[in-house]
Image (spheres, rainbow, N blue to C red):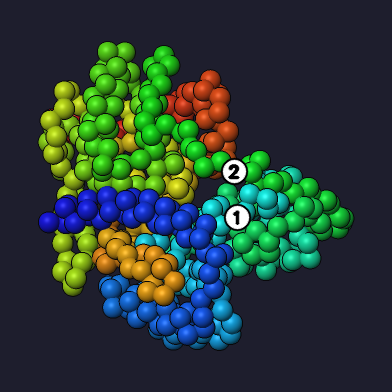
Amino acid sequence: MIKKLLSKKCKEFVIFNLFLLLAVAVNAQNAPKKLFEVRELKADVKVFFSKLEKIHPDLYYYYPKDSILQAKENIMQQIVAPMSWSEFAKLIAINTTRFFDGHTGLKWYFFNWNTIPKSAFLFPPKQISVEKGILYIDENTKIVSINGNSANEMINTMRNFSEAGTHQYKRDCSIEDNFSSFYYHLYGSSEQFRLIVEQNGQKTEKIVQGVAKKDVYANDNNTPNFDLIIKNDIALLTINTFNGNRFEEFKTFLDSSFKQIRQSNISNVFIDVSENSGGGDENVSLLLDYIYPTDYYFLYGYAKVKNKTYGSEWKRHNEVDTPYLGKVYILQSYETFSAAMDFSSAIKASNRGVIIGEMTGDPAYSFSNSTSFTLPKTGIHIACAIGFYAMPSGSHNCNLGILPDVYCHRKELNALKKDTNALFEYFKSIIAKYGDRESDIEMLKKFE
C-alpha cells in the first residue's frame, strides 16, 4: 500500500537526517586528522555516481546525463593532491547538489555549523536579505561585493546549494537564513567584512565587523516540538515535528489540546507547521482525524517505487472524541518539508482551511523514500531517493511547492512569533478577512 510506503518514507527520512547530523559531527571533528590519497578520493567519486545511478529511480529527471557526467569529470580534475574529509565533502557538494532532489546526494555540507571552528569569525547572522537574486543589507541598500567577492557571483553560487526542482524564491530564502555558514564555507573566516554597497545609484564602502562563531551559534535547541496557546476565541497549535517515533507523545498532546479547545468553545484554530521538516505520515493522519468529519475521504497522491505505481487516499485511521470542525488556518514556510508538506497538501486539496505563509520546501511532484550508502574510503554518508511521489498541489503548477492562500514572509512571521499579543492580533486580521470563506465541510451543508 502507498500509505505504508509513504509513511515509512517520511519516518525514515527524519531518522536518516538525525543519523547524518551525528555522523557529520563525528566526521567533522575527526576529519582534520587524516588526509585521503588521490586514488582513494577518485575511487569514492566513482562509487558516488555509480551508486546513485543504480539506486535512484530517475537520476536524470532534472538534468541530462551529460551534465552530471561533466560534473563528475570536473570533480576528478580537481583531485590533484590528498584532501581532508571536509575538503572532499565540499568538492562533492559544490559540484553536485544542484543536480539532485532534496533526498539525494550530499546536501548538508554548506548548512553545517559543525565544520566551522569555534574561533572562526563569521558574517553576522540575520543582517542580509535576498530579493529576486539581489543581496541587500539594511533597507534598500544593495550589496555590490563583500571582501572583493561579487555579490552576483555569490548569489549564483549559493543558489546551487539548494536541491534541484526548487523555486528560486526558496533558494533565496535559504541564502538569507544560512548566509553566515554559506559565506564561511566558500570564503573562510574574516574579522572584518568590507562591503561595497549601492543606494540611490551611489556606491560607498561599508565595514561590518565579524562575529565569533561561539557567540552566535549554540547546538542546543529550546524550541518546543508541540505547544498550545489559547487567547479568547483563538487557539494556536504549534507542531514542529511529525517524527513517527513520537507518535504516542503526539497523540497525548492532541488529545489534551483538542479537549481544551472544545471546552473553551474555540471557533478558530491556527496550526503552525512553518518549522516542521517532516516525520511520519501516521502522525499527519492522526492530526487530520482531529479536524475532519468521521467520514472524510480524499486523494492522498501517487507514488512510483521500484517500477510499481501506487495510489492512496486520506481517510480516518484513529477514533477521536468529537473532531473539531470549526475554522482552520495553517502557517507554513519554505521549511515546511516532507510529511509536513503532505499535511499542507491535504488541507489545500480538500479546502479544509486557509494556508498562510510561503510555498513549501518540496514541490508537489518530487522524489523521496530516502535510503543511504557510505563511500568506502572516506566514510561520507550519502542520501538517495528510491521513489517518486506526486500529490495534489491545489495550484496550476505541480512543480512548485504547496502555495499559500495568504502570503506572509517567514521573517515577518518569525517576528510576530516573538510577541504573542502581536501574533494574535495578526490572527484576528486574518479571521476578519478570510474567516467567512466556506470550507468543504460548510459547503456540504447546502446539499443535505
Q: Quadrant of the rendered structure where residue 240 is?
A: top left
Which of 422 and 53 lies nearest the eye of the viewer? 53
> Circle 1 sits on which residue?
116
- Horizontal and vertical percent position of residue 139: 73, 44
The residue depicted at 27 percent of the width and 13 percent of the height is 263
Instruction: Answer yes or no: is residue 253 visible.
Output: yes
Instruction: Answer yes or no: is residue 435 visible.
Output: no
Pick the quarter of the image with the C terminus: top left
Residue type, numbered disc 1? Ile
Pick the quarter of the image with the N terminus: bottom left
Mark 1 secondary-structure assignment:
loop
- On residue 63, which mark appears? none
The residue depicted at 36 percent of the width and 31 percent of the height is 226
Is 191 left or right of 312, judged from the image as shown?
right
In the rendered image of this protein, does residue 312 appear above or below residue 55? above
Q: Quadrant of the rendered structure where residue 321 is?
A: top left
In the rendered image of this protein, does residue 281 appear above or below residue 48? above
Is 229 left or right of 243, judged from the image as shown?
right
- Horizontal and vertical percent position of residue 436: 37, 28
In the rendered image of this protein, does residue 30 appear above or below residue 38? above
Q: How many marks do you count on the picture?
A: 2
Q: CA distance from mark 1 to mark 2?
A: 10 Å
Which of 161 and 91 lies nearest the eye of the viewer? 91
Q: Are marks 1 and 2 in contact (CB under 8 Å)?
A: yes
Around disc 2, counting alpha carbons within 10 Å, would you say few (fewer than 14), some (14 to 19), or many (20 or more)? few
Which of 110 and 140 lies nearest the eye of the viewer? 110
Q: Earlier in the sequence, mark 1 or mark 2?
A: 1
Which of 336 and 22 lies nearest the eye of the viewer? 22
- On residue 217, which mark appears? 2
Mark 2 secondary-structure assignment:
loop
- Horizontal and vertical percent position of residue 411: 57, 40
